Image: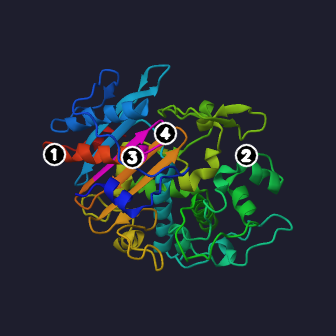
Amino acid sequence: MRKLYHLLACAGLVVVGACGGDGPSEPTPPPTNPPTDTFPITGQAVPGMASFDALIPALMKRWNVPGAAVAVVRDGRLVFARGYGYADVTEKEKVQPDALFRIASISKPITAAAILKLVEEGRLALDDAAFPLRPDLTPPPGATVDPRLNSITIRQLLHHAGGWDRNVSFDPMFRSTTAAQIMGVPAPASAETVVRYMMGQPLDFEPGSRYAYSNFGYAVLGRVIEGITGESYETFVKREILAPAGVTRMRLGRTLLADRAPGEVRYYDTNYAESVFPGGGTVPMAYGGFYLEAMDSHGGWIASTVDLLRFVTAVDGLPTRPDVLSAMSVQQMVAPPPPPLFMDSPWYYAMGWQVRPVEGNWWHTGSLPGTTTLLVRTGSGLAWAILMNSRSSGPMVGDVDQTMWQAVQQVGSWPSHDLFSQFP
């Protein structure tokens, strides 16, 4: 198997989740036998898979990560689930194998699955124009609306080809205070408020003409789901996608530390910012530097590694576990986007997944202040997830990815057990 790290590097373009970030460069090879005494490990030790217990603590030490969770599936069976380090450093609370973490942009495959479920049910078409489906969302009074706005399709939003480029203009999902001010509503701005604010902004390029990673595009998809179903995004996704996959603990996360969910880790980030909440003062970026509630459909879920693997094995098109989508929907989900997107590229962004078709690998990363995540499904029957409660600048994502591939490739023998039943 070719390392995902290498396919990212050769593509020359890396999508790293909800807050952007740096692409990978060659990381320092991990030591053969790193110390683990400062990193408590929870969960069942698995004979033949000791490579994870050596390499993950070393990775955490390199990037000063307090806590992480890792899980691995082989042929639909959960064969490995362990927690590393601390969920709360001050309280010496250990990360449990099924601890909840913010998953950041791994939320996008979940949103894509929900959209495809609506398409499957005949309630939506991929080439429907998105904004006319929410006539209740109106632009700022007196704003000049880009005439191309109402032509943007569901398909283009799924492929990040809607016309917004955060490198040309900005990412509105991190301009909560500005959006609220323009719309004349209390801060922080809801997802609906951000959408209305952006309806008064010009597009950065012709919809469908190129790829530009867009958190905002997936925020719009969340509002489409609500408009079609008449219920909240979270309610629909939990009932139609997560529950059939056996996932019961996933929920949308909250911004403030005081609203930390039971079983959720604490997030660590060295940066500070003015709070998105009026009068909040200067706060850690992870707890008020952005408004997580508005990021629901592009970066707002919290989950365990175990539940992420329940999800991925329920949409992977393999016969090992029942899928929540039809075979046609799964095929659409990972099919190449229409030209001119990713022509002559060894990988592409499909619908909620990055795909390298030669190996049959799908993946998505996630990144927020205090959060680094990776979810991988290979074409050889393997899948894994790693969730971490910190983020560093530099080539961290590439190192995380390469370390996981190294750990997998060093497995001495694959167990025959299935640990899914051990986790509710």
- Residue 247 visible in image: no
Q: Dot 3: few (<14), some (14–19), or many (≥20) neighbours within 10 Å? A: many
Give left or right: position of 310 versus 265. Answer: left
Where does residue 21 sit, x and y in percent of width and height?
51, 49
Coloring scheme used: rainbow
Q: Upstream in the sequence, badge 3 or badge 2? A: 2
Q: Amino acid at mark 4?
A: Arg
Q: Which residue is mark 3?
A: 307
Figure label count: 4
Residue, far left: 413
Q: Residues within 10 Å of mark 1 (few under 14, many from 20)?
A: some
Give the number of the disc on residue 188: 2
Looking at the rendered structure, the secondary structure element under dot 1 is loop
Between disc 3 and disc 2, the foreground one is: 2
Tell me which numbered mark, 3 or 4, is placed earlier along the sequence: 3
Q: Which mark is residue 414?
A: 1
Q: Is residue 66 visible?
A: yes
In space, the residues marked 3 and 1 are separated at their CA atoms by: 21 Å
